[in-house]
Image (spheres, rainbow, N blue to C red):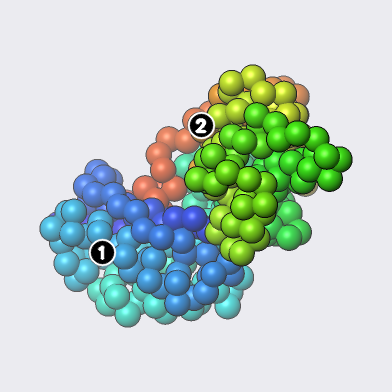
Amino acid sequence: MKYFLGLDGGGTKTDAALIDASGRVIAQARGGPSNPLRSSFARAFTSLDDAAARALAAADLEASSIQGVVAGLAGASQPRVSSRIAAFLATRFREAEIEAIADLEIALETVAESGPAVVLISGTGSAAFARDAAGRTARAGGWGPWFGDEGSAFAIARAALQTIARAHDTGALPSTFAQAIASSLGLKTWSEVFDYVSRKPLERMPAVFPAVAEAADAGNETAREILDASAKDIAALASIVITRLGLGGEEFLLGRVGGVVGRCAYFDERCAARLAELSPCLRVVAPRFSPAVAAARRALRNSPDSAG
């Protein structure tokens, strides 16, 4: 039996999925962050290795059983990144065909493996990626926390902390919203939150998002204002790629993936409403499978023995 490994890596985690030659998922596992542009190549290699090893152990397989590997990683749209990732994986899976590509490409395949489609990634970072009927693609966002990542966990958390900082400047009493965020981090005061997040902002900022989500679902107006703005930002990314490819003359699919999706009913509702305004031809769909499984399916299609 031949087996295929898919890896989906970002700034917070790495997911691995193993499938057999029929496409059946036989094991899944998770490792640490593997975006080399946010941490380091050494950290990315360790996380990829760990996630893959866990999946292999769960299926009781050796690396030599793997015939194909596809890794979809944040940052791998840059050739200097994808080539290093592919070279590393080749040392671990010597019998396999290796492909390292951008996580955006894999994410799009969770929506549709062919035909016109758009995917919005909202996780630690954010981006939009689209494909038209002719196979042309367009991308928007994905510029990282200092230049973009609109509607991501990082950006939402940053907006929340900025709001608290401004309230602190005016001498306002600590709000329920501020206290909820501090408590979610195991802290008590704004000063503690500021010091904690500032020491490792790339790692710790996204951890604020769950508290914002919970507050919004509980009806907190401050949290809802932040998420309303974030939903508008996410829809704007989708609008860019839709316009660039001229989508809208016929039905096309749009899906949302990432750690932010499905974590907050209020935010999901606001995103759906904003996206519905973009085109009457747009049909919002749930991803058919996870990005890691999509990567494994691509590895299977890459196999010389695949029927396509």
Q: Position of residue 214 (x, y in %)?
A: 56, 29
User: Is the C-beta separation of discs 1 and 2 under 8 Å?
Assistant: no
Residue topped by disc 1: 53
- Viewer-side residue, 183 vs 40: 183
Q: Mark on residue 82?
A: none
From this view, report whether residue 282 is shown above or below residue 60: above
| Residue 161 sits above or below residue 285 on the image | below
186 to the left or right of 156: left
Mark count: 2
Pick the residue in front: 108 or 304: 108
Residue 242 in sight here:
no
Position of residue 288 measured from the top left corner of the image (x, y, whole percent)? 43, 35
Disc 1, SS: helix
Residue furthest top as drawn:
219
The crowd level at tag 2 (other Cα within 10 Å; few <14, some 14-19, many 20+) is: few
Question: How far separated are the C-alphas under marks 1 and 2?
Answer: 28 Å
Identify the element where label 2 is drawn. loop
- Is residue 126 found left or right of 21 in the rendered image? right
Does 74 sit above or below residue 152? below
Say whether residue 44 is visible. Answer: yes
Query: Which residue occupies 58% across, 74% down?
Result: 79
> What is the quadrant of the N terminus in the image?
bottom left
Q: Which of 73/170 is in front? A: 170
Residue at 33 percent of width and 68 percent of height:
49
Q: From the image, tell me which residue sits under label 2.
A: 262
Residue found at x 41% / y 60%: 32
Type of amino acid at the residue the image marks with label 1? Ala
Q: Which of disc 2 and disc 1 is earlier in sequence?
A: 1
Seen in the picture, residue 292 relative to 257 is either above or below; the reply is: below
- Mark 1 Cα within 10 Å, few/some/many (few <14, many 20+)? many
Tell me which amino acid carries mark 2.
Gly
